[in-house]
Amino acid sequence: MSDYVLLVGTPSVEDYRRLRLVSGLSAKSQAAAEAGLPNTWFAVTIRHDDDTVGMGRIIGDGGTAFQIVDIAVEPAHQGQGLGKTIVAALVDHLRTHAPASAYVSLIADGDAQFLYAKYGFEPVMPASIGMALRID
């Protein structure tokens, strides 16, 4: 991580949209990003030189429910431990600032479940199942 800097703060709309696309996450419209990003509860970005190459956010109501979202690292910078750095910063912030009864959720795509498990996340099945509705 010596060539990288972790910064607290929400990514710009442009960086957010670009990082989602290049890392394989779904595209978000300009309007959706402009409306959603200001509602971030906590976020970090990773900079390399003058470029934002990674990000992660926490959204939620600030008390009872939180969700970790938008974990993304540019492919050219993957394999450097940046994803771990992002998740660790988000979880550390939650452990310090979220109330004791808060529920923290996330959706783990593919092998990302193994990364999240290192920070205490566990599958909720069969007691619960994650569900989603996409608005197209």
Image (cartoon, helix red, strand yellow):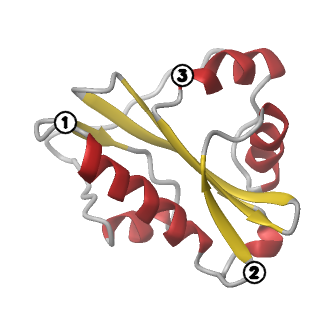
- Residue depicted at 42% across the width and 65% down the height: 88
Kindly identify which numbered label has been placed on residue 39. 3
Q: CA distance from mark 3 to mark 1?
A: 18 Å
What residue is disc 1 on? 102
Q: Nearer the viewer, mark 3 or mark 2?
A: 2
Quadrant, the C terminus: top right
Q: Earlier in the sequence, mark 3 or mark 1?
A: 3
Identify residue type, mark 3.
Answer: Asn
Q: Earlier in the sequence, mark 3 or mark 2?
A: 2
User: SS for tag 3?
Assistant: helix
Q: Is 44 placed above or below 83 here?
A: above
Q: CA distance from mark 1 to mark 2?
A: 35 Å
Q: CA distance from mark 3 to mark 2?
A: 30 Å
What residue is disc 2 on? 3
Q: Position of residue 125 (x, y in %)?
A: 22, 48
Name, please, the residue furthest toward the right: 50
Q: Is 1 placed above or below 28 here?
A: below
Residue 76 found in image quarter: bottom right
Indicate left or right for 96 with 87 as reference.
Answer: left
Toward the viewer: 21 or 49?
Answer: 49
Indicate left or right for 75 with 99 as reference.
Answer: right
